Amino acid sequence: MGSGQAMHESKTAVKTQATETTKVLNKIKYVYSFGKIRTDGNKSLKQLLGGKGANLAEMCAIGLSVPPGLTISTETCQVFHKAGGKLPQDVLDEVVEGLRIIEEEMGAKLGDAENPLLLSVRSGAAISMPGMMDTV
């Protein structure tokens, strides 16, 4: 093996190790909120948030009046399948926090008989394929 190839392999190993370290140090974000109180994403995150999620976040970011909501990232589907069809507690905790933000903005509570929070649930992807997507 030549010194050029050895150096390339060494750089690749260091880059791989750095990526793995970054994954451990940086908590993965699964849920992205959007609304007047907080907007986490924008149109540049289409691969991560799907078309609807990225566009809703972008509309909030530019100041359009959009009811608050949350988008569960496309990566979450991969995590769900790798975990044998179960959502990790981190994902559930982020969904609960996202719902709390929606409740705060709307002045309503999920499950409250007097002032219920009503939600619409939609599936989406980075590329639209009507009728071709499994919904979790």
Image: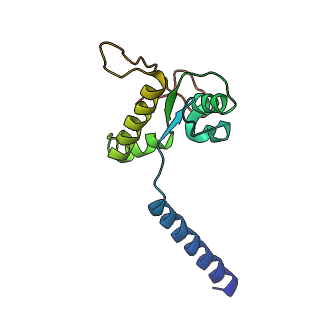
Q: Is residue 40 above or below residue 115?
A: below
Q: How many marks?
A: 0
Q: Is residue 77 left or right of residue 7?
A: left
Q: Residue furthest top?
A: 114
Image point (45%, 54%), residue name: 27
Find residue 127 and report its horizontal and vertical position in percent: 62, 32
The image quadrant that residue 36 belongs to is top right
Quadrant where the N terminus is found in the figure: bottom right
Find residue 111 and report its horizontal and vertical position in percent: 31, 20
Color encoding of the figure? rainbow
Find residue 44 and report its horizontal and vertical position in percent: 67, 41
The image quadrant that residue 119 belongs to is top left
Question: 18 or 9, which is in the foreground?
Answer: 18
Image point (56%, 37%), residue name: 49
Q: Is residue 77 left or right of residue 47?
A: left
Question: 92 or 102, which is in the foreground?
Answer: 102
Q: Is residue 84 above or below residue 36?
A: below
Q: Is residue 21 above or below residue 38?
A: below
Q: Is residue 97 above or below residue 1?
A: above
